[in-house]
Image (cartoon, coloured by chain):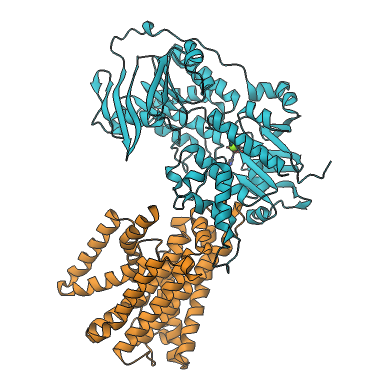
Chain colours: A orange, B cyan
Amino acid sequence: MIGRLFSARLTWVALAILVIGATLPLYVTGYILGILTLAYYFGVFAMAWDLLFGFAGEVNFGPTFLVGLGAYTAGIINANWGWPMAACVLAGALMAVGGGVLLALPALKLKGPYFGLVTLVAVLLLQNFIVIFAGITGGEIGLTVPDVLFIDDAANYEFALGFMALSGAILFGLSRSPIGLILQASGQDAVETAALGFNVAKHKLAAFCVSAFFSGTAGALMIFYLGTASVGTVVDIAVGVQVIIAAVLGGRRTILGAAVGAIFLILAGEALRPLGELSTFVVSAVALAVILFFPNGFIGSLLRVGERS
Amino acid sequence: MSAPLLEVSGLTKRFGGLVAVKGIGLEIRPGEILGLIGPNGSGKSTVMKLIMGIERPNAGMVKVEGVDVAGWPSHRIARQGVGIVFQHSRPLHRQTVLENIKLALLPDSLIRLFADPEVESKAIAIAERVGLGAVLHRRPATLPFADLRRMELAKAVARDPKIVLVDEPFAGLTSGEVHDFSNLIRSFREEGRAVLLVDHNVKSVSALVDRVKAMYLGEHIAEGTAEEVMRDETVRRVYLGGAITTAARPEASFKDAEPLLKVEDVGVLYGKAQALEKVSIHVHEGEFVSVVGLNGAGKTTLFNAISGLVPYSGTIGWGGTALAGRTPAAIARDGIVQCPETRELFGDMSVRENLDLGGQHLSKAERLERTEWLFELFPIIKARQPQAAKTLSGGEQQMLAIARALMMKPRLLILDEPTLGLAPVILEQLSKALEKLRQTTSITVLLGEQNVTFALPHADRVYVLEHARIIWEGDPGRFAKEAGAGLL
Ligand SMILES: Nc1ncnc2c1ncn2[C@@H]1O[C@H](COP(=O)(O)OP(=O)(O)OP(=O)(O)O)[C@@H](O)[C@H]1O
Ligand SMILES: [Mg+2]
């Protein structure tokens, strides 16, 4: 059955990359492992975003609304009430799903750019909320969480890799399943899709929930890795823009490409760090060039070639 | 007699001040085909959308097998057994033909991660039934027009609906294709489905249907057998109109020694496919020339080459100078205006704004004068001025596209399939308008058509394009005898 969702070659390639990835702690420094760990969580943000935009066709300019909800919910509960970590992560994920449902309501009424505006406003609202209720959220300074995932770099790394692989497999499988096809149809032409007997609202709502679940979970896990939650890492609009660039860079509507794009973006930013301020500029310019000249992205160009033949 | 599958009564729909559908009622039994005719904008498509639940009726009842579904969301109506073939094809562009059909076969479920194994074989069987067997893995954008329409039919039947609403299946098809489609629709009858059919091809509709209902301005005007309805006085006046007659002028009567437009040995390649091969045509100033040919023969490609939209080999001369190397905008400013088959209207802008855009380069007085003249030509466009262009009926959009092209005061007007989706009475109006243009202005017209009954009367000269080549040239009088086979 699985073979019908994942073409054999793709599965093998992905597995090979994973195995190589899993052995990295044997030969790279803890510093690099740390960066990759962040990149993997970032990859999940981007994949979750791709499900909404690439498949359901929803222009979500604020992926960090869902990420931030998950991260801060988990962090606040952990810091203020000391719940165990797993319960905090679950609460964060559920809160993000709630946020996803909240976003889905206007999404079903408004068209493209208007909905995009709503998502931007949602991020700003969340950001304001965090600043205003600094007493429990830590405000602009950030929120320190008492619990951490693992002390060991390698353990953190392997955990993030496993989490990304699992999320990727689920999201990718979903996108290739009949539901993925119905979602794409709903995104492209809702009237026609409804006339074929599909409840477009139900499918879009489901897409919002799934996307929010993975965004929120990844956000929550990331702050337990970092030990702090701050607006600058999980809520700021600039972070959201990075998520979007990562997904587009890797290839829209491919899910896996989003992860590749995210890893590339974070690594490139790091490699160019010696350039100082200039590094952001260079990375952005490269991203822009790829988007302009290879609108299908890294993976998109590869996969689409296969589709055509 | 069995009970009706579909029972509609008192159906009414208002768009702002416009009552698009006014108290319409109809009944269709299993295995029955009801034709719905009426001039452009009379509300036929709206009736279908109301039945399908795409628009909510303001009043009325829609009973599917006795269950009143009026006001239900369209996915529930679809599951109640109603399917629609839209007037404009709506393929999923990113998916292949097979995937498009497969979609229609999927259950509306969030937990079915794996499609039933028979979905694939069912989809293939349906594709073969409608004649898409050879193009299963192509994407819609690469398909010829008729295949896109086949795909829409395939999607509709994939749901196995008891009631099928088919909106203008014959528009833009060749007579051979119309024949195929008629047979397909006839097979729906044999399967016991109830069919509601809208089309402006009166001959094919009459041959196919059991009964006809005619509408005008949203209201019922006649119902009965096809002959009865076509004989009805009102139907004749508001829908059928009179016969089209004009006379060709001999080529020698055009005084310019060097033709205004001279296309010589033009070839166009799309990848490996030869879309045009050594095509040469010429058009004199003031002359009306028709290029007739089946779908895919290369008419649109030829026009696009003239307008500078596709690269070509050979030369295209305009008033003595070569057009090669000029941008489409420069060519348009020089007086060559193409009214494309795809209409290219600005959907979110109003009808008036679309027109004004066409008249950008005219002085205000001239623009107003021209607008008045066009309103006289197409009164319905006048009535629809503030409406967003995308909400116009199919035929109204076509009229607006032609009006906008005329607004640009072209020296050479290229009309690509202008008759697509127009009611007979509008064809007559368009015909009169062209005739008036011919008599009162020095405008030159190049007309691409597969509707020979429209193309011939308006032409001084005719070219026949087949498989990328010109295979015949002559005056319309000789056409029927020498080249008509396959096109008439
Ligand atoms: N959303 C809308 N808003 C405003 N007016 C509309 C809307 N949809 C349709 N109309 C108007 O309602 C009238 C009926 O349109 P409809 O599409 O049903 O015509 P039709 O009979 O199918 O015509 P055609 O033969 O040209 O396709 C038209 O005049 C059209 O402009
Ligand atoms: Mg219509």
- Of residue B257 and residue A215, the one placed in the foreground of this image is B257
Judged from this view, the residue extending furthest toward the left is A274
Determine if residue B316 is in view.
yes
- What count of labels does the image hold? 0
Q: Percent x, y for residue A252?
A: 38, 61
Determine if residue A143 is in view.
no
User: Left or right: A248 with respect to A179?
Assistant: left
Q: Is residue B188 above or below residue A277?
A: above
- Of residue A146 and residue A179, the one placed in the foreground of this image is A179
Question: What residue do we see at 58% from left, 48% from top?
Answer: B126
User: Left or right: B112 with respect to A229?
Assistant: right
User: Left or right: A93 with respect to B47?
Assistant: left
Q: Percent x, y for residue A107?
A: 51, 61
User: Left or right: A72 with respect to A20?
Assistant: right
Question: Quadrant location of ligand 1?
Answer: top right
- Of residue B242 and residue B469, the one placed in the foreground of this image is B469
Question: What residue do we see at 24% from left, 29% from top?
Answer: B324
Q: Percent x, y for residue B191?
A: 71, 44
Question: What residue do we see at 49% from left, 68% from top?
Answer: A174
Q: Percent x, y for residue B429?
A: 55, 21
Where on the picture, by quarter, is residue A48?
bottom left
